Amino acid sequence: MEGLIFGPVTSRRFGISLGVDLSPNEKRCNFDCLYCELAGAKPVSFIKDPILPEVYIETIKKSLKEFPQSQFITLTANGEPTLYPYLDELVDMIKALHVKQKVLILSNGSTIMDPKIAATLHKIDVVKLSLDAVSERTFKRIDRPIKGLHVKDIIQGLKQFSKEHKGVFILEVLVVKGLNDSVEEFEKLNDAIGMIKPDRVDVGTIARPPAYKVQGVSKKELEVLAAIIENIPVTIPWEASYASFYEFNKKDLLELLKKRPQNADDVKRSFSPASKLLLDELIEAGVVRIQEVAGVKFYKA
Ligand code: SF4
């Protein structure tokens, strides 16, 4: 079946990984985060028409044959993977393959209070859960959860999970400009994280065009905020020019391309859609030319 597996993708933190999409047909999430890289959607509590675990296992087996160098099988979704109703069975079936790849799950952490889900996640080698805020107001503003979810319950669930988890447990905080980027919020996060005691905390910011009009913060700001977290190893995943999406007018764009030719990656990651269109028009008009340097495409004015 198409779309069940993606990758392999390479990331600095997890190496080479094969992604398993537990909601391949549409976004199904119990959050509607402002920063989501998928389009905004009303939060829901279940995955519609779930694919049977047997189908996933066959696809995983085929993909592992094709990409034996993969280091992780990553359970993720177009949304929240713990909403997948056969997660426990699927994890057991992957484990029964006895392959060298470790299993990783990327979840928003909102279901961790459910003992059944916590028990499933305990079987997974690396569990990455999110916590973007400690104050209910900020949590609701950023993550926009389905009715009935409260951050104090999630924190309680994270504490309990961490106490019992034998594998690696990583907590991720995603910083959104003007929402959870205050020292005050981070001091509260530090208190909560001190009680949760994950193995590691990743403090990141917006890396892809977000669902709603929000912005990330600079690397410097991330460093200042990350330094507030004490006694737990903290990493700052950072990819250059990811924090904001630049909107250029013709004059500024030409100025930039004269001084500093941009490569295709820069354009993809940091230009707004309108700026990309403008660049195409300038290429068409012959004002901007493309030059290839050692296999990398550059745009020059
Ligand atoms: S939890 Fe993840 S998938 Fe769900 S809305 Fe937030 S960023 Fe998107």
Image (cartoon, rainbow, N blue to C red):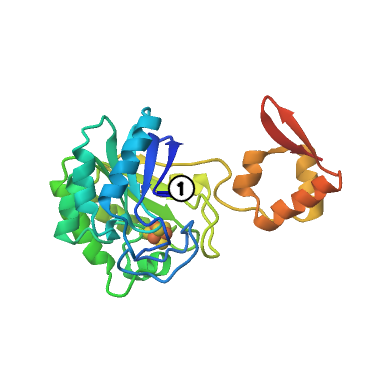
Q: Position of residue 118 (x, y in %)?
A: 18, 54
* Residue labelled with disc 1: 222
What residue do we see at 46% from left, 48% from top? 222
- Give the position of the C terminus as an image quadrant: top right
- Which of these two is toward me, 229 or 204? 204
Answer left or right for 273 relative to 208. Answer: right
What residue do we see at 44% from left, 38% from top? 9
Answer left or right for 148 relative to 163. Answer: right
Whereabouts is ligand 1, in terms of quadrant? bottom left
* Disc 1 C-beta below 8 A from ligand 1: no
| Residue 241 seen in render | yes
Is 90 drawn above or below residue 213 in the view shown? above
| Residue that lies at the very extreme toward the top in this rendered image | 294
Residue 110 occupies which quadrant of the picture? bottom left
Density class for disc 1 (Cα within 10 Å; few <14, some 14-19, many ≥20) is many
- Which of these two is toward me, 15 or 165? 15
